[in-house]
Amino acid sequence: MVYIKNSELEKLPYISGFPAENQTLHGCPYFDEDRKRYLIQYFNEKGDIISLYAIPVKGFYYSKSKKDIEIDFFTEFFNIMYCDYSYTFAANLIYEILNDISNLSAIFEKYFIFLNHFSTDSSIYKPVLVRTEIEYFFGVIRSLYDLLQNLIKLFVKNYMKIDLPNSYAQMFDNNEKIKSNWPKLPKRLVSYYNSTAKLFFACRDIRDKIYHYGATNNFLVYFEEGFGIDQELLSFSEFNIWPQHKIKKNNIVSLLAMFAYITKNIIQNMNELALVLLEEFKPQKRFISADYMIFFRGPCTEHLNKLDKYLDEQWLK
């Protein structure tokens, strides 16, 4: 095991002090303001820092500000998890959550790839490519909710010594209200569950119809400005996000808008959860300097910065 010297950690501008128990130093690049470049730190067998030039391509980096406005994405969730907590017990889950968010961003990339492809070749068998993306999308959403549940479970276990189930759905009764099994849970955490239940169960019901009962939205319509779905199929109408002037003939609505709405809301749910955890489960100490934040980027993260545009415009060439 390499022992990291305090004197070496102090050389890193984004570190505010030596980590407390259960905190870890994540191997993320940081943007060095003096050298105007990205650096990543390694430690040799003596515990001395070795800094290498490393531009982040996929994953997190520390910086005082966003360095690429188009592709870099910021959320309170990841910022709080890394900068305020940086707990070892949650490290793997944070990466798994990041992977699911990255997968959601890739769905938008594929949406536009398929849209461009359909403009030159609309062969009858091609709609299956987009229909399977709808099924995959709801699978990722369910995965994300269960990952968030496992994160909550870890915090509650470590702070309160209470065991919660692994599944998000198991926290609720038949009326979609949090069960009374955990009377000691903080009120704000209970409120978080109840406030996010509606979207979760709407997405879960669609996923169950697809994955358990073989349902699919066979009625996919191609327009030059986007793909359309029948909002009455698979209970899509519950989202109620399509204004009348955006609905096309025969009740066809924008698939892009639905993807954007759900993705935006689950990211908002994640941010709300992080703030609840910060309020109810005080960090041991802030490991990362208050001047620094954590951002992430990936091959398709530009779409996460355009969710409001996609939801507002709905139909885009």
Image (tube, rainbow, N blue to C red):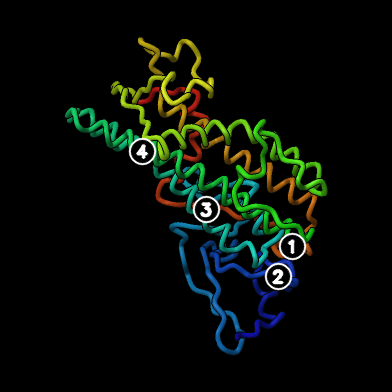
Name the disc covering residue 98, or none: 3
Give the tally of numbered discs: 4
Residue 299 relative to residue 291: left or right: left
> Mark 1 near mark 2, Cβ–Cβ under 8 Å?
yes
Q: Which mark is residue 158?
A: 1
Q: Nearer the viewer, mark 1 or mark 2?
A: 1
Mark before the other along the chain sequence, 2 or 3: 2
Q: Is residue 68 left or right of residue 180?
A: left
Residue in the image at 74% along x and 72% along y: 21
Q: Earlier in the sequence, mark 3 or mark 4?
A: 3
Q: Amino acid at mark 1?
A: Asn
Disc 2 residue type (three-letter):
Asn
Circle 4 residue: 133
Q: Quadrant of residue 215?
A: top left
C-alpha distance separating marks 1 and 4: 37 Å
Find disc 2 in the rendering and name its residue: 22
Give the left or right position of residue 114, taking residue 92 as reference.
Answer: left
Q: Name which residue type carries label 4.
A: Glu
- Identify the mark nearer the N-term, 2 or 4: 2
The quadrant of the image that shows the C terminus is top left
